Amino acid sequence: MSNDRLLRIAVPNKGALAEPAAAMLRAAGYRQRTDAKDLTLIDADHNVEFYYLRPRDIAVYIGRGDLDLGITGRDMLIDSAADATEIMQLGFAGSRFRFAALGGSTMTVADVAGKRIATSYPGLLRAFLDEQGISAELVKLDGAVESAIRLGVADVVADVVDTGTTLRRAGLELFGDSICSSEAVLIQRNGAEELPASADALRTRLTSVLVAQNYLMMDYNVEQSSFDATLALAPGVEGPTVSTLAKEGWYAVRVLVPRKGAHLLMDQLYEAGARGILLTELTACRL
Ligand SMILES: Nc1ncnc2c1ncn2[C@@H]1O[C@H](COP(=O)(O)OP(=O)(O)OP(=O)(O)O)[C@@H](O)[C@H]1O
Ligand SMILES: O=P(O)(O)OC[C@H]1O[C@H](OP(=O)(O)OP(=O)(O)O)[C@H](O)[C@@H]1O
Ligand SMILES: [Mg+2]
C-alpha cells in the first residue's frame, strides 16, 4: 500500500475520553469535528482521516486492521483482547480498575472466589482472576455497576475508579490492590505493516503537546554574582538562553522548567537572587 495514503485514526466519540482526545488533537494542530453528529472528518493538510467511534469499539477496529491508529483507554484495550498494542501514553483519562464491596465487609481478593462479580470489563477481570487462579461468576453490566450490589445482582463489583465519589455514594469500599492502572493510549495493530508517513508526524505532534503540558517557560533577571546559583537550580533542557540586561551587571535568563514544582522553584530562585520571575504556559513545543 502507498506510504502517502490517508492515515485512518479512530477517536472516541463519547464518554470520558472523547473531549480530552479531541482537545489534544486540536492542540497538536489537527482539525477536529465541530458537529458531534459527524462520523468522520478529513484533515487534508495532514493527510489523515478521523473516525469517531465508541471508545469500547476502537481496539476492535484497530486489532482487525480496519483502521491504522486509535485512541482508547488501556483498560478497554486489555478488556477487548484485540490484536493491538499501545504505542504511546497520552496522559489523560487516568483511572484504576478496582474491586469494591459493601462498606465494612473487610473482603480480600482471595474472598471473591465463588462470588458474583458485576463489571463492565469482563475480559480484563477474567484475565486477572485466571492469573490469580480464582474462579468466580462474572455479571456483565453496561454501566452504573456500583448499584449492582444494592440491587442484589452481585456480591462484589470491579469497576473504573477515578475520584472514588461514585463508589462512596453507593456505600461501597475498595479492597485489594489495583487490578489495572489506566490512561488514554494511542494504539496500533500488532505487527502492522508500515504506516503512512503521517503516522510519525502524528506521534511527534502528540509528544510535543505532552511536553508543552509538562513544562513551563520561566524568565527571570539576575545579577552576575548570583547567576551561577540560579543556573544550578534551573539548568533547563539544553541550557538556558542568557542575554544581558540594559542594567549593568545583570542578565536576563529564559529557561524551560518542569510544571511540577515550578512554584517551589520560583521561591528558591528568588531566594538565590533572581528577580522579575515570570512563568508562561507553552502551547506546543518541539524539543
Ligand atoms: N471518571 C473517570 N475519570 C477518568 N477516566 C475515566 C473515568 N471514567 C472512565 N474513565 C476512563 O475512560 C475510558 C472509558 O470511559 P467511558 O466513560 O467512555 O466508558 P464507558 O462509559 O464504559 O463507554 P461506553 O458508554 O461505550 O460503554 C476508560 O479508559 C476509563 O478508564
Ligand atoms: O471514581 P469516580 O470519579 O466517581 O469515577 C468513576 C465512575 O466513572 C465511570 O462511570 P461513567 O460516568 O462512565 O458511567 P457508566 O458507569 O455508566 O459508564 C466509572 O464507571 C465509575 O462509575
Ligand atoms: Mg463510562
Image (cartoon, grey):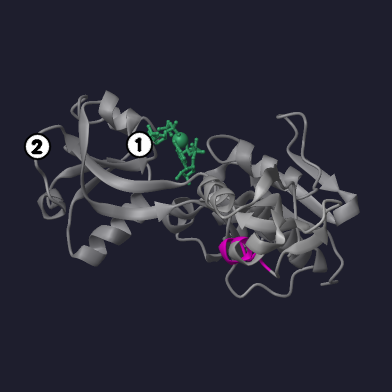
**Between 234 and 205, the one nearer to me in the picture:** 234
| Residue 140 picture location, percent across and down | 33, 41
Q: Callout 1 environment at 10 Å: few (<14), some (14 to 19), or many (20+)?
A: few
Label 2 to label 1: alpha-carbon separation: 23 Å
| Residue 96 picture location, percent across and down | 37, 48
Which residue sits at x=77%, y=31%? Answer: 34
The correct choice, above or below, for 90 with respect to 278 in the image is below
**Between 26 and 52, the one nearer to me in the picture:** 26
**Mark 2: amino acid:** Ser
Residue assigned mark 1? 141
**Start-end of magenta stretch:** 230-237
Residue 85 position by quadrant: bottom right
Q: Is residue 233 magenta?
A: yes
Say which of marks 2 and 1 sits in front.
2
Label 1 CB, ligand 2: below 8 Å? no
Which residue sits at x=76%, y=56%? Answer: 250
- Helix, strand or loop for disc 2: loop
The correct choice, above or below, for 153 with respect to 112 in the image is above
Q: Visible in this render: residue 67?
A: no
**Between 283 and 109, the one nearer to me in the picture:** 283
Residue assigned mark 2? 105
| Residue 16 picture location, percent across and down | 53, 37
**Between 72 and 248, the one nearer to me in the picture:** 248
How many dots with numbers? Answer: 2
| Residue 235 picture location, percent across and down | 63, 66
- Helix, strand or loop for disc 1: loop
**Mark 1: amino acid:** Leu
Extreme residue in the right direction: 45
